Image (cartoon, rainbow, N blue to C red):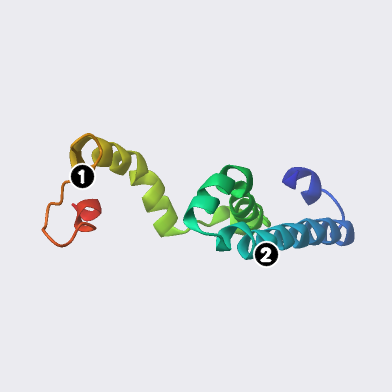
Amino acid sequence: LQRKLEVLDAAPRLLSKGSIGLALLAAVSVWAAGPFQTHRAAYNNAHPYFGFIPILAYLYFRNLTPSLRERSVGLMANVGYHSLELYLLHHHAFLSNNGQALTVLVPGYPKINAVA
């Protein structure tokens, strides 16, 4: 869709990108005021149906212009680079007692596990 919009003239391109952006902002606003504000159990039940909305909006606005597509956020790139390793380490090294307890490397500071 983005490639098709990039070949349009300036006015139709801005109008189409703006209308899609406004629709996504409205969807994120409804999501933030509705399912995101519910209690944990209700949110967990609704998440499979509404969880894609903020991700879709992020992806759209992240790729809105060619200059935005060329840049990246260092933190996101770093998390993406290490996410598989952290996931495997979490499930194989830090969880004990069949996933019911967390092994902590530094007592009182469980978040240090992600840094170690």
Residues at marks 1 and 2 touching, judged by CB atoms closer than 8 Å: no
Name the disc covering residue 11, or none: none
> Which quadrant would residue 76 be assigned to in this image?
bottom left
Q: Which x, y percent locates residue 78?
A: 37, 52
Residue drawn where x is 48% and y is 55% of the image: 40
Residue that appears at 25% across and 52% down: 114
**Disc 1 target residue:** 101
Query: Horizontal and vertical percent for residue 41?
Result: 49, 51
Of the two numbered discs 1 and 2 on the same chain, state the one appearing first in sequence. 2
93 left or right of 9 in image: left
Q: CA distance from mark 1 to mark 2?
A: 37 Å
Q: Residue at x 67, y 64 (%)?
A: 29
Q: Quadrant of residue 65?
A: bottom right
User: 73 and 30: which one is in front?
Assistant: 30
Image quadrant in which the N terminus is located: top right
| SS for callout 2 | helix
Q: Amino acid at mark 2?
A: Ser
Q: Which mark is residue 29?
A: 2
Total numbered labels: 2
Q: Is residue 76 left or right of residue 28?
A: left
Image coordinates of residue 112 in percent, x first then y, are 20, 57
What is the three-letter code of the residue carrying label 1?
Ala
Q: From the viewer's side, name the closer residue of 109 and 96.
A: 96
Disc 1 versus disc 2: nearer the observer: 1
Residue 94 in the image: above or below residue 75: above
**Disc 2: CA contacts within 10 A as few (<14), some (14-19) or many (>=20):** some
